[in-house]
Image: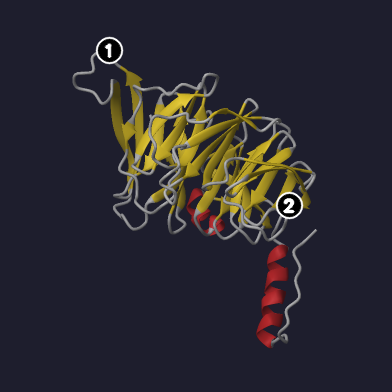
Protein backbone atom coordinates (compact mmCIF):
# COMPACT_ATOMS: atom_id res chain seq x y z
CA UNK A 1 0.00 0.00 0.00
CA UNK A 2 1.34 3.42 -0.84
CA UNK A 3 0.44 7.03 -0.24
CA UNK A 4 -1.76 8.69 -2.85
CA UNK A 5 -3.62 11.95 -3.15
CA UNK A 6 -5.28 14.06 -5.83
CA UNK A 7 -4.34 17.67 -6.31
CA UNK A 8 -6.94 20.19 -7.46
CA UNK A 9 -4.34 22.22 -9.32
CA UNK A 10 -3.14 21.30 -12.80
CA UNK A 11 0.04 19.33 -13.26
CA UNK A 12 3.12 21.18 -14.45
CA UNK A 13 6.34 20.09 -16.13
CA UNK A 14 8.08 20.57 -12.79
CA UNK A 15 5.64 18.14 -11.17
CA UNK A 16 6.27 15.60 -13.94
CA UNK A 17 10.04 15.80 -13.46
CA UNK A 18 9.71 15.53 -9.68
CA UNK A 19 7.54 12.42 -10.01
CA UNK A 20 10.00 10.77 -12.38
CA UNK A 21 12.87 11.54 -10.03
CA UNK A 22 10.94 10.10 -7.10
CA UNK A 23 10.21 6.95 -9.06
CA UNK A 24 13.88 6.57 -9.95
CA UNK A 25 14.85 6.97 -6.30
CA UNK A 26 12.45 4.19 -5.36
CA UNK A 27 14.69 1.77 -7.29
CA UNK A 28 17.32 2.19 -4.58
CA UNK A 29 14.98 1.08 -1.80
CA UNK A 30 15.26 -2.40 -0.22
CA UNK A 31 18.73 -2.96 -1.69
CA UNK A 32 21.92 -3.32 0.32
CA UNK A 33 24.73 -0.91 -0.50
CA UNK A 34 28.28 -1.16 0.82
CA UNK A 35 29.24 1.99 2.74
CA UNK A 36 32.05 3.33 4.89
CA UNK A 37 31.53 5.18 8.16
CA UNK A 38 32.46 8.40 6.35
CA UNK A 39 29.48 7.83 4.03
CA UNK A 40 26.93 7.55 6.83
CA UNK A 41 26.10 11.27 6.92
CA UNK A 42 25.34 11.21 3.20
CA UNK A 43 23.28 8.02 3.48
CA UNK A 44 21.24 9.11 6.52
CA UNK A 45 20.88 12.67 5.21
CA UNK A 46 19.22 14.36 8.20
CA UNK A 47 18.80 14.11 11.97
CA UNK A 48 18.15 10.54 13.11
CA UNK A 49 15.26 11.05 15.52
CA UNK A 50 14.83 7.29 16.05
CA UNK A 51 17.52 4.61 16.37
CA UNK A 52 17.22 1.04 17.64
CA UNK A 53 19.55 -1.98 17.60
CA UNK A 54 18.71 -5.64 17.13
CA UNK A 55 19.48 -7.65 20.28
CA UNK A 56 22.68 -9.06 18.71
CA UNK A 57 23.92 -5.65 17.55
CA UNK A 58 24.11 -6.69 13.91
CA UNK A 59 21.52 -4.23 12.59
CA UNK A 60 20.68 -0.62 13.44
CA UNK A 61 17.34 0.77 12.29
CA UNK A 62 17.28 4.54 11.74
CA UNK A 63 14.36 6.93 11.25
CA UNK A 64 15.15 10.48 10.16
CA UNK A 65 13.20 13.71 10.65
CA UNK A 66 12.61 13.79 6.88
CA UNK A 67 10.77 10.47 7.03
CA UNK A 68 13.44 8.10 5.69
CA UNK A 69 13.67 4.68 7.33
CA UNK A 70 16.86 2.73 6.74
CA UNK A 71 18.81 -0.20 8.17
CA UNK A 72 22.58 -0.33 8.67
CA UNK A 73 24.34 -3.71 8.89
CA UNK A 74 27.17 -3.72 11.47
CA UNK A 75 27.66 -7.51 11.44
CA UNK A 76 31.29 -7.37 10.24
CA UNK A 77 32.87 -4.25 11.77
CA UNK A 78 32.32 -0.50 12.03
CA UNK A 79 34.49 0.14 8.96
CA UNK A 80 32.82 -2.38 6.67
CA UNK A 81 29.11 -1.57 6.64
CA UNK A 82 26.09 -2.12 4.44
CA UNK A 83 23.06 0.17 4.39
CA UNK A 84 19.57 -0.31 2.96
CA UNK A 85 16.92 2.37 2.51
CA UNK A 86 13.61 0.82 3.55
CA UNK A 87 10.85 3.38 3.04
CA UNK A 88 9.96 7.06 3.00
CA UNK A 89 7.03 7.38 5.42
CA UNK A 90 6.40 11.05 4.47
CA UNK A 91 6.18 11.92 8.16
CA UNK A 92 8.26 12.00 11.34
CA UNK A 93 8.99 8.48 12.61
CA UNK A 94 7.80 8.12 16.20
CA UNK A 95 8.89 4.60 17.11
CA UNK A 96 10.99 1.72 15.77
CA UNK A 97 11.11 -1.82 17.17
CA UNK A 98 12.99 -4.98 16.27
CA UNK A 99 11.66 -8.45 17.05
CA UNK A 100 14.04 -11.35 17.61
CA UNK A 101 13.23 -12.84 14.21
CA UNK A 102 14.46 -9.66 12.50
CA UNK A 103 11.12 -8.00 11.85
CA UNK A 104 11.25 -4.21 12.03
CA UNK A 105 8.12 -2.31 13.09
CA UNK A 106 7.78 1.41 12.44
CA UNK A 107 5.07 3.93 13.34
CA UNK A 108 4.99 7.56 12.25
CA UNK A 109 3.53 10.89 13.37
CA UNK A 110 0.74 10.67 10.78
CA UNK A 111 -0.59 7.36 12.12
CA UNK A 112 0.92 5.13 9.43
CA UNK A 113 2.79 1.98 10.44
CA UNK A 114 4.57 -0.78 8.58
CA UNK A 115 6.55 -3.96 9.20
CA UNK A 116 9.72 -4.96 7.38
CA UNK A 117 10.68 -8.62 7.03
CA UNK A 118 14.44 -8.22 6.80
CA UNK A 119 14.98 -11.76 5.53
CA UNK A 120 12.66 -11.39 2.53
CA UNK A 121 12.98 -7.57 2.29
CA UNK A 122 9.20 -7.26 2.08
CA UNK A 123 6.87 -4.66 3.61
CA UNK A 124 3.38 -4.80 5.04
CA UNK A 125 1.62 -1.52 5.83
CA UNK A 126 -1.30 -0.36 7.94
CA UNK A 127 -3.07 2.91 8.66
CA UNK A 128 -4.33 4.06 12.02
CA UNK A 129 -6.38 7.16 11.24
CA UNK A 130 -3.97 8.30 8.55
CA UNK A 131 -3.31 12.04 8.66
CA UNK A 132 -3.93 12.48 12.37
CA UNK A 133 -1.10 13.89 14.49
CA UNK A 134 0.49 11.59 17.07
CA UNK A 135 3.24 12.98 19.30
CA UNK A 136 4.43 9.75 20.90
CA UNK A 137 4.26 6.08 20.06
CA UNK A 138 5.38 2.70 21.31
CA UNK A 139 4.63 -0.96 20.59
CA UNK A 140 3.17 -3.63 22.83
CA UNK A 141 3.07 -7.18 21.47
CA UNK A 142 1.21 -6.88 18.12
CA UNK A 143 -0.41 -3.59 19.09
CA UNK A 144 0.54 0.06 18.74
CA UNK A 145 0.05 2.78 21.33
CA UNK A 146 -0.22 6.30 19.91
CA UNK A 147 -0.27 9.33 22.17
CA UNK A 148 -1.71 12.82 21.84
CA UNK A 149 -3.44 14.13 24.96
CA UNK A 150 -5.17 10.79 25.23
CA UNK A 151 -3.54 7.46 24.41
CA UNK A 152 -4.97 5.15 21.76
CA UNK A 153 -4.42 1.40 21.89
CA UNK A 154 -4.57 0.21 18.29
CA UNK A 155 -4.94 -3.35 17.04
CA UNK A 156 -5.30 -4.27 13.39
CA UNK A 157 -5.43 -0.55 12.41
CA UNK A 158 -8.46 0.00 14.68
CA UNK A 159 -8.54 1.97 17.93
CA UNK A 160 -9.80 -0.48 20.55
CA UNK A 161 -9.20 1.66 23.67
CA UNK A 162 -8.69 5.33 24.49
CA UNK A 163 -7.40 6.23 27.93
CA UNK A 164 -5.30 8.67 29.97
CA UNK A 165 -6.14 11.96 31.72
CA UNK A 166 -6.25 13.94 28.48
CA UNK A 167 -5.00 17.14 30.11
CA UNK A 168 -1.61 17.55 28.47
CA UNK A 169 0.35 16.22 25.50
CA UNK A 170 2.32 13.02 25.93
CA UNK A 171 6.06 13.62 25.49
CA UNK A 172 7.50 10.09 25.78
CA UNK A 173 6.21 6.53 26.16
CA UNK A 174 7.88 3.23 26.92
CA UNK A 175 6.57 -0.29 27.64
CA UNK A 176 8.31 -2.56 30.15
CA UNK A 177 6.84 -5.96 31.07
CA UNK A 178 3.22 -5.13 30.19
CA UNK A 179 3.32 -1.73 31.89
CA UNK A 180 3.12 1.47 29.85
CA UNK A 181 5.02 4.43 31.28
CA UNK A 182 3.91 7.79 29.91
CA UNK A 183 5.67 11.12 30.41
CA UNK A 184 3.55 14.25 30.06
CA UNK A 185 4.36 17.80 29.06
CA UNK A 186 2.32 19.76 31.57
CA UNK A 187 4.02 23.13 30.96
CA UNK A 188 0.77 24.40 29.42
CA UNK A 189 -1.31 23.39 32.45
CA UNK A 190 0.02 24.58 35.80
CA UNK A 191 -2.71 22.70 37.68
CA UNK A 192 -1.37 19.30 36.62
CA UNK A 193 0.75 17.42 39.14
CA UNK A 194 1.55 14.29 37.13
CA UNK A 195 4.86 14.05 35.28
CA UNK A 196 4.80 10.30 34.62
CA UNK A 197 1.91 7.85 34.88
CA UNK A 198 2.06 4.04 34.62
CA UNK A 199 -0.75 2.03 33.01
CA UNK A 200 -1.25 -1.74 33.12
CA UNK A 201 -1.71 -3.49 29.76
CA UNK A 202 -4.06 -4.64 28.36
CA UNK A 203 -6.53 -3.17 30.86
CA UNK A 204 -5.05 0.37 30.41
CA UNK A 205 -5.85 1.07 34.07
CA UNK A 206 -3.43 3.36 35.92
CA UNK A 207 -1.21 1.57 38.42
CA UNK A 208 0.65 4.66 39.60
CA UNK A 209 -0.25 8.33 39.19
CA UNK A 210 3.11 9.88 39.98
CA UNK A 211 6.42 8.05 39.72
CA UNK A 212 8.87 10.85 40.39
CA UNK A 213 9.42 13.47 43.03
CA UNK A 214 10.19 16.04 40.35
CA UNK A 215 7.22 17.82 38.83
CA UNK A 216 9.16 18.93 35.77
CA UNK A 217 8.11 17.71 32.36
CA UNK A 218 10.02 14.69 31.14
CA UNK A 219 11.06 14.82 27.49
CA UNK A 220 12.67 11.38 27.17
CA UNK A 221 12.41 8.01 28.92
CA UNK A 222 15.01 5.26 28.68
CA UNK A 223 14.97 1.74 30.15
CA UNK A 224 17.84 -0.35 31.46
CA UNK A 225 16.95 -3.02 34.02
CA UNK A 226 15.82 -2.47 36.72
CA UNK A 227 15.33 1.27 36.22
CA UNK A 228 13.58 3.70 33.91
CA UNK A 229 15.60 6.86 33.42
CA UNK A 230 14.05 10.21 32.52
CA UNK A 231 15.34 13.60 31.37
CA UNK A 232 13.50 16.56 32.87
CA UNK A 233 12.98 19.96 31.30
CA UNK A 234 15.38 21.27 33.95
CA UNK A 235 18.20 19.15 32.53
CA UNK A 236 18.27 16.53 35.30
CA UNK A 237 18.32 12.78 34.76
CA UNK A 238 16.44 10.83 37.44
CA UNK A 239 15.35 7.22 37.65
CA UNK A 240 12.71 4.98 39.25
CA UNK A 241 12.16 1.25 39.53
CA UNK A 242 10.33 -0.37 36.62
CA UNK A 243 8.51 -2.83 38.87
CA UNK A 244 5.87 -2.25 41.53
CA UNK A 245 5.70 -0.19 43.63
CA UNK A 246 7.69 1.88 41.07
CA UNK A 247 9.55 3.87 43.71
CA UNK A 248 11.89 6.68 42.66
CA UNK A 249 15.59 6.32 43.44
CA UNK A 250 15.85 9.41 45.63
CA UNK A 251 19.64 9.30 45.66
CA UNK A 252 20.05 9.31 41.88
CA UNK A 253 20.18 12.63 40.08
CA UNK A 254 22.65 13.63 37.38
CA UNK A 255 22.66 17.17 36.06
CA UNK A 256 23.60 17.48 32.41
CA UNK A 257 24.09 20.65 30.45
CA UNK A 258 21.52 19.66 27.82
CA UNK A 259 20.96 21.86 24.74
CA UNK A 260 18.01 24.17 25.39
CA UNK A 261 15.13 23.93 22.94
CA UNK A 262 16.10 20.50 21.56
CA UNK A 263 14.40 17.15 22.23
CA UNK A 264 17.58 15.43 23.38
CA UNK A 265 17.77 11.65 23.71
CA UNK A 266 20.32 9.96 25.96
CA UNK A 267 21.11 6.27 26.44
CA UNK A 268 22.03 4.05 29.39
CA UNK A 269 24.07 0.84 29.50
CA UNK A 270 25.10 -0.84 32.73
CA UNK A 271 26.40 2.03 34.89
CA UNK A 272 27.08 4.36 31.98
CA UNK A 273 25.19 7.29 30.52
CA UNK A 274 25.88 8.89 27.13
CA UNK A 275 24.46 12.18 25.85
CA UNK A 276 25.19 15.38 23.96
CA UNK A 277 25.61 18.66 25.84
CA UNK A 278 24.89 22.30 25.00
CA UNK A 279 28.51 23.00 24.03
CA UNK A 280 28.59 20.46 21.23
CA UNK A 281 30.30 17.66 23.17
CA UNK A 282 29.47 13.96 23.19
CA UNK A 283 29.88 12.87 26.81
CA UNK A 284 30.07 9.47 28.50
CA UNK A 285 29.40 9.50 32.25
CA UNK A 286 30.13 6.47 34.41
CA UNK A 287 28.30 6.44 37.72
CA UNK A 288 28.45 4.38 40.89
CA UNK A 289 26.93 4.61 44.35
CA UNK A 290 29.22 5.89 47.08
CA UNK A 291 28.97 5.62 50.85
CA UNK A 292 31.08 8.74 51.13
CA UNK A 293 28.84 11.51 49.80
CA UNK A 294 31.15 14.29 50.90
CA UNK A 295 32.73 15.02 47.53
CA UNK A 296 30.26 13.44 45.13
CA UNK A 297 26.96 14.48 43.55
CA UNK A 298 23.91 13.08 45.38
CA UNK A 299 25.88 10.11 46.70
CA UNK A 300 27.13 9.17 43.22
CA UNK A 301 30.70 8.91 42.01
CA UNK A 302 30.68 10.41 38.51
CA UNK A 303 33.43 10.01 35.95
CA UNK A 304 32.82 12.09 32.85
CA UNK A 305 34.68 11.43 29.61
CA UNK A 306 34.38 13.60 26.50
CA UNK A 307 34.13 11.09 23.66
CA UNK A 308 34.18 13.83 21.03
CA UNK A 309 34.20 17.62 21.12
CA UNK A 310 32.60 19.00 17.97
CA UNK A 311 33.01 22.57 19.23
CA UNK A 312 29.70 23.70 17.75
CA UNK A 313 26.88 24.58 20.14
CA UNK A 314 24.54 25.25 17.20
CA UNK A 315 24.89 21.67 15.97
CA UNK A 316 24.69 19.53 19.15
CA UNK A 317 24.37 15.78 19.45
CA UNK A 318 20.62 15.12 19.68
CA UNK A 319 20.41 11.32 19.64
CA UNK A 320 22.92 8.69 20.71
CA UNK A 321 22.78 4.91 21.26
CA UNK A 322 25.13 2.42 22.87
CA UNK A 323 25.93 -0.69 20.87
CA UNK A 324 24.38 -3.52 22.93
CA UNK A 325 27.57 -5.63 22.98
CA UNK A 326 30.58 -3.69 21.69
CA UNK A 327 32.24 -0.58 23.10
CA UNK A 328 31.05 2.08 20.71
CA UNK A 329 28.13 4.46 20.29
CA UNK A 330 26.34 5.83 17.25
CA UNK A 331 25.30 9.46 17.30
CA UNK A 332 23.28 11.94 15.26
CA UNK A 333 23.66 15.73 15.38
CA UNK A 334 21.10 18.46 14.69
CA UNK A 335 22.18 19.10 11.09
CA UNK A 336 22.38 15.44 10.16
CA UNK A 337 25.97 14.47 10.99
CA UNK A 338 25.97 10.76 11.76
CA UNK A 339 28.85 8.69 13.04
CA UNK A 340 30.45 6.12 15.32
CA UNK A 341 32.67 6.75 18.36
CA UNK A 342 34.45 4.11 20.46
CA UNK A 343 34.98 4.22 24.23
CA UNK A 344 37.02 2.28 26.81
Q: Residue furthest front?
A: 191
Residue named by callout 2: 128
Q: For the N terminus, which image quadrant?
A: bottom right
Tell me how the rendering is colored.
secondary structure
Q: So how many labels did they put on this image?
A: 2
Q: What mark, if any, has residue 69 been given in the picture?
A: none
Q: Nearer the viewer, residue 305 or 230?
A: 230
Left/right placement of residue 19 relative to residue 339 reads right
Examine the rendering and report whether any part of residue 212 can be seen. Answer: yes
Image coords of residue 324 (percent x, y): 53, 30
Label 2: element kind: loop
Task: Residue at 65% x, 27% y: name it.
Answer: 178
Image coords of residue 87 (percent x, y): 68, 56
Left/right placement of residue 164 relative to residue 171 reads right
Label 1: element kind: loop
Task: Residue at 29% x, 28% y: name it.
Answer: 303
- Badge 2: few (under 14), some or many (20 or more) residues near its Cα, within 10 Å? many
Residue named by callout 1: 291
Please identify, in this view, whether the residue under mark 2 or under mark 1 is nearer the observer. 2
Left/right placement of residue 260 relative to residue 107 reads left
Q: Is residue 188 above or below residue 155?
A: below
Left/right placement of residue 70 relative to residue 214 reads right
Image coords of residue 193 (percent x, y): 44, 38
- Badge 1: few (under 14), some or many (20 or more) residues near its Cα, within 10 Å? few
Amino acid sequence: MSFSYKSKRQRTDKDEVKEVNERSLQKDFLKWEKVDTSDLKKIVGSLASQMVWTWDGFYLAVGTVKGLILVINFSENVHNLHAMMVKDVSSLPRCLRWSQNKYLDCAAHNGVSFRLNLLTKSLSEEYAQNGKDYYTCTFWKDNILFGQKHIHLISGSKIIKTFGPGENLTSSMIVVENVLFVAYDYSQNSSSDKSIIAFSLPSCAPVSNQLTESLFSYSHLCYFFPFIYGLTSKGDITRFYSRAPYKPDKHFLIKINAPIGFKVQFDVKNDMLVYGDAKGKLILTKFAKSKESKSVQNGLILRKVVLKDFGDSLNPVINVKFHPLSKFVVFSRWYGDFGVVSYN
